[in-house]
Image: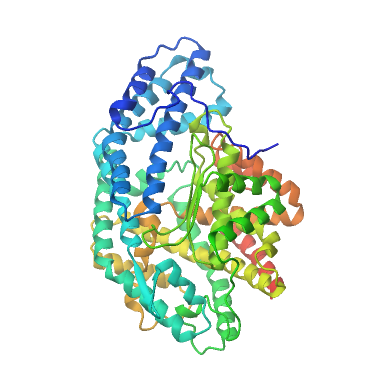
Amino acid sequence: MYTANIQKLPRHFIPAGFALTDWQSIEPFFKILLEKEINTKEELEQWLLQLSELEAVVSEDACWRQIKMTCDTTDKSLEEAFNFFCTEIQPHIQPYADALNKKLVNHPLVNGLDQQQYFTYLRSIKKNIDLFREENIPLQAELSVMQQQFGVINGRMTVTINGNEYTLQQAAKILENPDRNLREEAYRKIQERRLQDKDALNDLFNQLMAKRNEVAANAGYSNYTDYRFKELGRFDYGKQDCYAFHEAVKQHVVPLVKIIYQKKKEKLGLDELRPWDIDAEQEGVKPLQPFNTGNELVEKTIECFTKLRPFFGDCLKKMNEIKHLDLESRKGKAPGGYNCPLAESGAPFIFMNAAGQMHDVTVMVHEGGHAIHSFLAHPLPLTGFKEYPMEIAEVASMAMELLSMEHWDVFFSDAAELTRAKEHQLERVITLFPWIAIIDKFQHWIYDNAGHTNEQRTAKWMEVLNEFSDGVVDYSGLENYRSHAWLRQLHLFEVPFYYIEYGIAQLGAIGMWMQFKQNPEIALDNYCNALALGGTATLPKLYETAGLTFDFSPATIKELMDFVKVELDKLH
């Protein structure tokens, strides 16, 4: 039913050889659409297809600029090309986009469109009209450029250990080494290196925060939180649901984290479990090494995905063929990992910083799940239909982490190592929740207390951090590192408030895995059918199609956490 034989969208409105160089080159197409007379439903649908094509061309151009810049933060010309788009092209597009949105929603024929198919699309357009303010255009352009400075600052960070220079991602691998002294050295050097840029990152964050608050005020909002919830299209839950999530994590997840770390402490035979011990194994047990090179990671992931469902493997094969993968960590590369959908090409781009760790397998299958989502949504007729909510996008990726475990023997031929890898994954599923709650609760405080100082922010961070403390990991003497730990979180800088989605989606992913345990084929059919809807259904409907309930109440969190705990205990 589904195919990875994805084709670049043919152009019917924009010339085939057209390349976006500056605003003057693209403006005529916006003018044509704005001035076009629409007299029949068929003409309206044709107009929407032309608008969709224009959006795809612009979107893909912007995406490639960002991809190239993150792949090499040392090349100034790539950074300049991205900044040029943000400051010299995007600001000119926004008034046209608003005018085109109004032309559509105010057109008498809009009610003749299939309301089921167009409901979420039109709802999103109306939301964009509500939020649009001319005076926010330059501010949003500045924000787009400033946010990327987080990657530039972090891309420069390296440490030297035993005479070798490492990126921070590469150095993190040493935290798995059986030599405890070496682990401590690596941990301290990584933290010290981060501290060197704490002032620069704090200054950057203050500038971002001030501009975001200004954008919200211009749009008539008393705080950035409410503005951002609307901007993110959070139609199906609100702030109170987030607060309930924080409390449920404290109540039902933190006790499980405590058990996990207590067992780790006993296994390592330590009097105190320190932060550099969390990823370590006991003496004589080598760290998991699922692959050695980026190519091997690709080959093994393709094999794993193919065993799960051949279509999944085909998606990665296609991306590999057309060189839409950049996986290995290197100096000058921005931190993190992402899957970037490409509206015209269809086949997305995966970027990550692999260093040969177990964590890299998790990131690869996670981004691979996002990639499959991109493939499944690509056949939808409008670019706007493919803009799906993040709460389902992260189900695509996080469910793949759990579903793919069924075939992790491709990474680990040794049964004991395979068990360790699965343990690592399920422990991570549990231990991730408190960090999600911490980041989300911290953000709510940040933007509800707009006039705070750096010192007040640090104090609040420590308060929230301690609120979700497991009480097992000993951080004594490391307070200076701990108090600045939030500065490493990319989302706070680049995509504010986008983090609780991971928690909501992790619950959905666990639900998908429960289904899979009962009937693998039905679960995978539900997974594909939900993702193929893109953004054409509401979140509750997307979850329902996936065989899930959109619910992240305390009772649901408890039920799903209990299930993961049972599965984890089976491995011990």
Q: Quadrant of the C terminus?
A: bottom right
Residue displayed at 75% across by 48% down = 521
Residue 548 placement, left or right of 54: right
Q: How is the image coloured?
A: rainbow
Q: Quadrant of the N terminus?
A: top right
User: x, y percentage for residue 338?
Assistant: 47, 52
- Along the viewing direction, whichever of 165 and 60 lies nearer the viewer: 165
User: x, y percentage for residue 506?
Assistant: 57, 56
**Count of picture labels:** 0
Residue 262 placement, left or right of 93: right
- Along the viewing direction, whichever of 254 and 348 lies nearer the viewer: 348
Residue displayed at 43% across by 64% down = 438
Residue displayed at 31% across by 43% down = 81
Residue 88 in view here: yes
- Along the viewing direction, whichever of 97 and 345 lies nearer the viewer: 345
91 is higher (above) or lower (below) than 192: above
Residue 253 placement, left or right of 440: right
281 is higher (above) or lower (below) than 486: below
Residue 13, image quadrant: top left
Residue displayed at 43% across by 17% down = 107
User: x, y percentage for residue 462?
Assistant: 35, 71
Residue 230 in view here: no
- Along the viewing direction, whichever of 7 and 180 lies nearer the viewer: 7
User: x, y percentage for residue 125?
Assistant: 43, 30
